[in-house]
Image: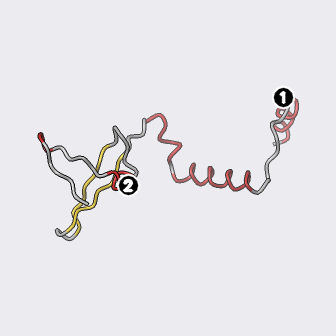
Amino acid sequence: MKARVCAWAQITLPTKVRRQRGVREGDGVAFRSIRTVRTSCMGLRTIPADQAWFWTDGWQAGEREASEQIVDGKTSGPLSEAEFLAELVTD
């Protein structure tokens, strides 16, 4: 695949590259030279500082665990107000 450098050093990434690398409109792009022969390109997304906690390794591990429990049917429906309060007292 090829791209042409246009005015102001702009490059239009081919659609296949954008899809493979998960690059969407508004994303940043990082380039890294590999052994001075090739260059790697990857999309970058900015995460708002007040949402960064969600993307920590620990939180994401918990999200995966919860998703597995849902798929395995190891969850129950929503608790009533009384059930919720009883759970708080017993834990």
Mark drawn on residue 81: 1
Mark drawn on residue 21: 2
Q: Residue placed at 34% from the left, 42% from the top?
A: 27
- Please tell me how crowded label 1 is: few (under 14), some (14-19), or many (20+) other residues with Cα within 10 Å: few
Amino acid carrying label 2: it is Arg
Rendering coords of residue 52 (x, y %): 47, 41
- Please tell me how crowded label 2 is: few (under 14), some (14-19), or many (20+) other residues with Cα within 10 Å: some
Say what secondary structure mark 1 lies in.
Answer: helix
Mark 1–mark 2 distance (CA, rounded to whole Å):
45 Å
In the displayed structure, 79 sits above or below 34; it is: above
Amino acid carrying label 1: it is Glu
**In which quadrant of the rendered image does the N terminus lie?**
bottom left
Location of residue 64 by image quarter: bottom right
Out of 54 and 36, give the one closest to the viewer. 36
Q: Residue placed at 66% from the left, 55% from the top?
A: 65
Out of 47 and 22, give the one closest to the viewer. 22
Location of residue 37 by image quarter: bottom left
